[in-house]
Amino acid sequence: MASLKIQFGMRAGDLISDEIPTLKGSDNVLFAMQLLDEYKMTHLPVVENGEFLGLLSDDAALEVENYDANLASLRPALKRVFIFNTQHVYDIVNLAAQFQLSAVPILDEKEAYVGVVSIYCLVRELAQLAAMKDPGAVLVLELNQSDYSLSEIAQIVEGNDAKILSANVTSHPDSTKMELTLKINRANMDGIIQTFGRYDYQIKASYHQSSHEDMIHRRYDELMRYLKI
């Protein structure tokens, strides 16, 4: 299986994978439905002589009465959505979310078809970019947008001998509030949470191993050692 490697600032064209097939305009609807089912996809790109005709969805294929019809004849039903190969990887995520895509076609500056990115592969690799696989804990802060200062927040974390592995901001257009989700390289964040409280930060959620849990594990280990005597 091909592997994608995402780096900060990586362009969409660097993420093209050979895991997802491309349909031809001369392929018929029945063949397309078989591929969609085989690869567990809801969309596949249709290309003819290097020209991107559009994305075929499984819903559109099911609505066709004649399964022998070739895909080129279905152009009105194909979604003409794509990303240029020079755009940022985040643009792929935005487009996929907007149109609920399982695959995003990539075109060059002349709108010639270059390849496709599977959303399943993209999410898998984005997990590495966001430090999701690294050990640590997650802390969610709620604050006013006008009070947001990542440098101050980083100082609080680093003042507790920890580091921020990733930071993600979620805001809503109809609110002055925002949420900041931090991945921190510490399993126990009792001290960090207390420090944020002293600085009047509101902790909306935390996912970590507390000192109380540490104590329970130590008592359990001591009991197991005692029983083995």
Image (cartoon, grey):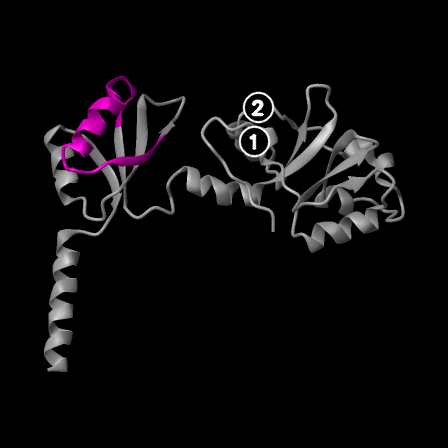
Q: Which residues are magenta?
A: 143-168
Disc 1 marks a residue whose amino acid type is Ile
- Disc number placed over residue 87 in the picture, else none: 2
Badge 1 element:
helix
The answer to whether the residue labelled 2 contacts the one labelled 1, judged by CB atoms less than 8 Å apart, is yes
Residue 55 position, x and y percent, is 72, 36
Question: Please, what secondary structure does the residue beneath circle 2 have?
Answer: loop
Q: Residues within 10 Å of mark 2 (few under 14, many from 20)?
A: some
Q: Which mark is residue 182?
A: none
The percent coordinates of residue 29 (x first, y second) are 83, 46
Residue that mark 1 sits on = 92
Query: Seen in the image, is 205 located left or right of residue 116?
Result: left
Q: Quadrant of the C terminus?
A: bottom left
Q: Quadrant of residue 222?
A: bottom left
Residue drawn at (13%, 75%) of the image: 225
Q: Give coordinates of residue 216: x percent, y percent.
A: 14, 63
Q: Is residue 226 above or below residue 176?
A: below
Q: Is residue 142 left or right of residue 100?
A: left
**Amino acid marked by disc 2:** Gln
